[in-house]
Amino acid sequence: MSQENTESNNPKIGHDEWVAQVASRQAQAYPLMRWWHALPGYGQWLMGLLGLALFLLVPIITANPLLLASFNLSNNNFILLTLNRFLIFAMLAIGLNVVVGYAGLLDLGYVAFYGLAGYFYAYLASNFVTAFSPNGIHLPSLVVIILIVAGVSLIGYLLGALSLRLSGDYLAIVTLGFGQVFTLLALSATRIYLPGRDRAVDFTRGPNGINGLDPLNFFGLSLNENWHYFYFFSLMLLLIYIMVYRINHSRIGRAWRAIRDDELAAEVMGTPTGRLKLLAFALGAGIAAFAGVLDAAWQSNVVPVPRYSVFTLINLYAMIVLGGIGSLPGAVIGAFIFTLLPEILRSVALASVIFYGLSLWGLYIFSGSWRRFGRLLAFGILFGFVLKGLLLLLNVARADLASSSALNSLIQSWLFIAEPYKVLGNVLTIVGILLVLALVIWRKHQTFSDILAVLGLYALAFAWETRLGLEPAATRILIVGLSLVLLMIFRPQGLLGKAEVRVV
Amino acid sequence: MLELTHLNLQFGGLKALSDVNFKLNQGEILSIIGPNGAGKSSLLNVITGIYKPISGDIHFQGQSTLKLSPHQITRLGIARTFQNLRLYLNMSVLENVMTGAYCQSRAGLLSTALRLPSWRKEEAEIRAKAEHHLSFFGNRLQGYRHQQPAYSLSYANRRRLEIARAMTTGASLLLLDEPAAGMNPHESAEIAEVILRLRDEGYTILLIEHDMNVVARASDRVIVLDYGKVIAQGSFAEVTEHPEVIAAYLGRKAVG
């Protein structure tokens, strides 16, 4: 304040400037971001293009059995299917980000728009609706997409109009109700009596969903293979990304963010807040509908649960929270991590690498310096071998576990896996978690926390080798959940989000 | 320009404003003073359409504003600042000001998504307008500060930013709600100059202020409110001599 009053022509004075640079200073704290920011402009572009090229080459790599073998992969479809799911989820996350991230409307009925579009696609492009012709309705994809996106946007607009006066928790409840009604209808609208018809009409085929939907076709070209869809989805994601980016960097995006920050001020400053909220709702619903059509056509079916249920909704929210609410690249990265991580964790070898990597990273964060980290690690290794020697001398029974990878056999030459290893594994899983918790609580106490860290590391390795690593189906969910918890503790604004200031 | 006739505002049993009448002329600086709770801020909220009066009428440039929502009133040409500062804290300084231009611009979704020439032209105009209004405060809100988030600004700069945002709405009437609150004497003196310069730029100003130095320096005419009633009006010198005003500020006994 005192600096404010000095009559200087140089504006670069005062504490304001220092405060203004907070974002770049914070970025310096992360090695990856420091590396990224240190790159020159063309370097960043080059890296981006390289990444994009690699991504776009995936179908070619996975189509070549020789290349596949050299990457030690067997099922090429699996990779492409996962990537296609990522592309769909990225579109959905971008749409949700418009509603939640920009306009600040907590919409829990979002999945219903995605599902509605899927069912509408089934009605307009399959053998399902036989009322007009015995072969069903088969409209060209372009017409279907336009019809459905417009129709579902309108539904989003109407839902928004009904709940316009609500905000926050109240809006969440109303939209959640809408989403649940949709799921229930999709599950149970199988015997509906219509006027002028004797027999009940099946609208949804219940939990089985509708199969045999047409593939997408444009001007006589039909998309039949997974890799067709891969390139088509990539292009569409890019278009949606650019569209939303442009809208966000315009008067409409500014008005949305203004409403999120202070709705009353926005209204009094000439922004029609009601109309803009409806626009956000409709745009979000439109993007969800677009993704819904693409998804239904690609998978050739619609299934109400779990695809259009609250599970998907939670996944989507986790994606945008992970990436950072209100961040467009964050939504895409969140979708990427959330569709790929659970799949990667299916492989025990990869899961082990991730588990030990995360453990070491956690140890580094905890120790705060390389010196202490090295000391703890050395003590940990020493502790393992000493314990092993001791137990060998005492002739304790050893379990014979097959190791699935080089890393596992390395770890198992250090660990002493005693019988009964399953019981011990269960016990040490709990003990390991308790030790980590104790470590967080007593982290200020140097010596004590060092001992806890060494013991914790050993317990976790034991737990992983005997229990967690052997059951990837359960463990992968655990790891995903745990990483989310840790992220929210250490970086509540998400990977690419900005920390928000509400009251100063 | 602005005319309030027999305006009554009530919250439950509490009369916030009773039978308020006054006229604001083009190019005038009118100050409203009064003790805390006299109804000054309620008056601004009624004029900007946040509160609806139970009776009476408000005319702005001959048009009644009672049926309009706040953003429509702003589009007609009334913009305000807030006593307790309501900036968009997480947006940059420049963006804060650019949002003010919303009611003056018209680009739709399609032209925005395609970045049509019409959109580019309008966006450039909005930016130029915002930069122009920020330059009103000399180098206080210039240069690197354009990209700074609003939460990092000092208190005085936030007040300036609110005024710049109000100017960007294209309003001809500015309602300033305690622009000098929380400022030191030097900054208050500067605010008085800013208000006079705003008038020179062609704005009409309705000022609510507790700082009597600012009121004395800037206002052409002063209205005194107490318990929602206008108890005196005239020049600053006239109202400060008025016995009811002295009573309102110092208590009945002081007048004796």
Image (spheres, coloured by chain):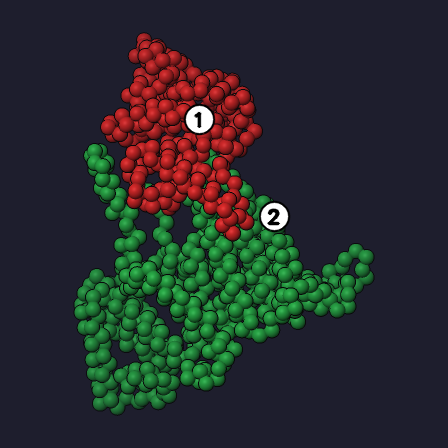
The dot on residue B173 is 1
Chain shaded red: B
Residue A12 in view in this figure? yes
Is label 1 in a helix, a strand or a loop? Answer: strand
The dot on residue A143 is none
Q: Sort mark 1 into few (<14), some (14-19) or many (20+) by Cα contacts within 10 Å.
A: many
> Three-letter amino acid code at disc 1?
Leu
- Residue A188 position in % (x across, y down): 66, 63
The answer to which quarter of the image holds residue A197 is: bottom right
Q: Which color was chain A given?
A: green
Q: A356 and A45: which one is in front?
A: A45
Q: Nearer the viewer, mark 2 or mark 1?
A: 1
Q: B117 and B66: which one is in front?
A: B117
| Residue in the picture at 51% in, 44% down | B118
> Compared to A499, does A304 lie above or below?
below
- Residue A391 position in % (x across, y down): 24, 86
Q: B223 and B78: which one is in front?
A: B78
> Compared to B47, does B117 lie above or below?
below
